[in-house]
Amino acid sequence: MISMGARRDIRSRLFGSIGRVLGSIDTDVRSMARSIKGVELGGLGDIECPDGAVGVFTDGSNVVSERRGAGIVAFSAVSLVFRISGGRLRVLERCILSPATCFLVMVPRFNVRTRANNIMRGLELLTATYMLEKGGDVQPSFVVLDGSYVSTLLSARWGIEHIYRDLYELSVKSAGSAGMKHSDFVWMCGSISDHVRRFLEEEVFSTSEPGEISRRFLESHATAVDEMFEDLVGSFGVPDEAWSALINFLAMFLETNFMMECLRRLLVAARRRRKPLMWLNKEPESRMLARRLGRSLRMLTDAMILDIALRRGEYLRCLDLPKIDPSGKYVDGERCDRRATHALVPDLADEVYGIYGSYGVIYVKYADFVIQYTYPRAIFGPSREERHMLDSAVLSYVRMLWDASPLGYPHPMIQAHSTAVLREGLAEVMADSLLEGLTDERDGLIRRLIEKPGRRLAGV
């Protein structure tokens, strides 16, 4: 129990310096909106609202059980199609990927949760693309996905960067005379890209049905990594001490590029149909605005600042933001930047970041707290006029969703989340059930892989 005196001390230490500047946040934000190009403060009541529209709302979930030699991961992804008119909602269609078919024994076991999130994002993008392209009587006007478009673009290097550095160090720098030349390592990266491109094109994405795509990817995952490893070791003479790092890198490279290929397909479908894509983040952690408002506020997130500064029904839109480009996302024989991380197949990176790397951000306060929309600005085309048209369309849908957000968050996304969310213990149950079914003596190695970790077997 914290004493009253300790509480006062904590309050004084934590909030003393912040409290002195909170009173000026409202004035500072409004002054910034007037003075900085591309930042606009406005009221939703001034935005023309569509009479009605059809929206796709997408969310996903995954749960993990880290076992002795593998991660057991269960996935779900949901896209619900709603007709929205004057705050009235009606579900028209749905696409659901469930753990019954989306289940992975993840080997090798490392960075399991980061890798699971990457695959989950890919599954979400698959269902959204399917509902956008399905055709028929229901024609979606826009798509809303859970999360952040900016984070999705930046996440290509998350997790894989240090694995790539380890592989380079063990293959080239630390292996001495037995190591690879730098040029050979670069060519090996190109070969990895070719392997992954062929695997995704020929074995995974030769259908448009999300259930079949997910089944092919998850069932072929381990085999694809193993085949790439055998070919690369034989072709490039990878030193023995780098083998583990190579296997880790291949697994994460494959998963990252699966996610980004799913993103590319959604972006292409949206551009072909001229339908806005919007990512909705209920807990944004960006500090883009905070950096502009002075040192005292840099420890706060933009959402925290705008919770105070914005009034109900106001929005803050940020355009003319720095484009996220493909620089540093891959290496190849022609452009080898030693600071780069080979995270993506070059053609895939050039298309996603080269065409769709510009984005817009809208913070909006529907009720008592701020949420964030991010969106690619090139969906209608690259010209200034086309981007302006897209910006206006997105803002009109943000305005329309205000009527469907009595709790401060769009109800269709709440329903998508409720449909997708998995119970935390599900992966444990599925792993134990799988273990119980392995009774043959020949299953000994697999049993070892998915047994509970040693500390739990020992009761620690």
Image (spheres, rainbow, N blue to C red):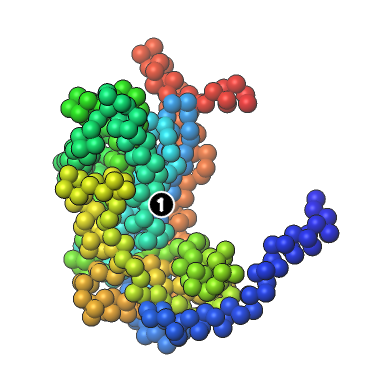
Quarter that holds the C terminus: top right
Q: Residue at x 36, y 55 (%)?
A: 154
Image location (x, y in percent) of residue 71: 43, 33
Image location (x, y in percent) of residue 129: 27, 57
Q: Residue at x 20, y 50 (%)?
A: 335
Q: Is residue 28 above or below residue 215?
A: below
Q: Residue at x 57, y 25 (%)?
A: 455
In the orientation shown, which residue stands out farthest toward the bottom?
46
| Residue type highlighted by circle 1 | Gly
Image location (x, y in percent) of residue 235: 17, 27
Q: Quadrant of residue 16?
A: bottom right
In the orientation shown, which residue stands out farthest toward the top?
441
User: Helix, strand, or loop for circle 1?
Assistant: strand
Q: Quadrant of residue 50?
A: bottom left
- Left or right relative to 3: residue 171: left
Question: Is any atom of residue 426 visible in this view?
Answer: yes
Question: Is any atom of residue 228 visible in this view?
Answer: no
In the orientation shown, which residue stands out farthest toward the front?
177
Q: Which residue is mark 1?
A: 60
Crowding near the residue tagged with mark 1, few <14, some 14–19, many ≥20 C-alpha atoms within 10 Å: many
Q: Is residue 191 above or below residue 9?
A: above
* Of residues 411 and 88, the one drawn nearer to the viewer in this rendering: 411
Q: Residue at x 56, y 83 (%)?
A: 27
- Left or right relative to 203: residue 172: right
Q: Quadrant of residue 24?
A: bottom right
Q: How many numbered marks does the figure carry?
A: 1
Image location (x, y in percent) of residue 395: 37, 77
* Of residues 362 and 278, the one drawn nearer to the viewer in this rendering: 362
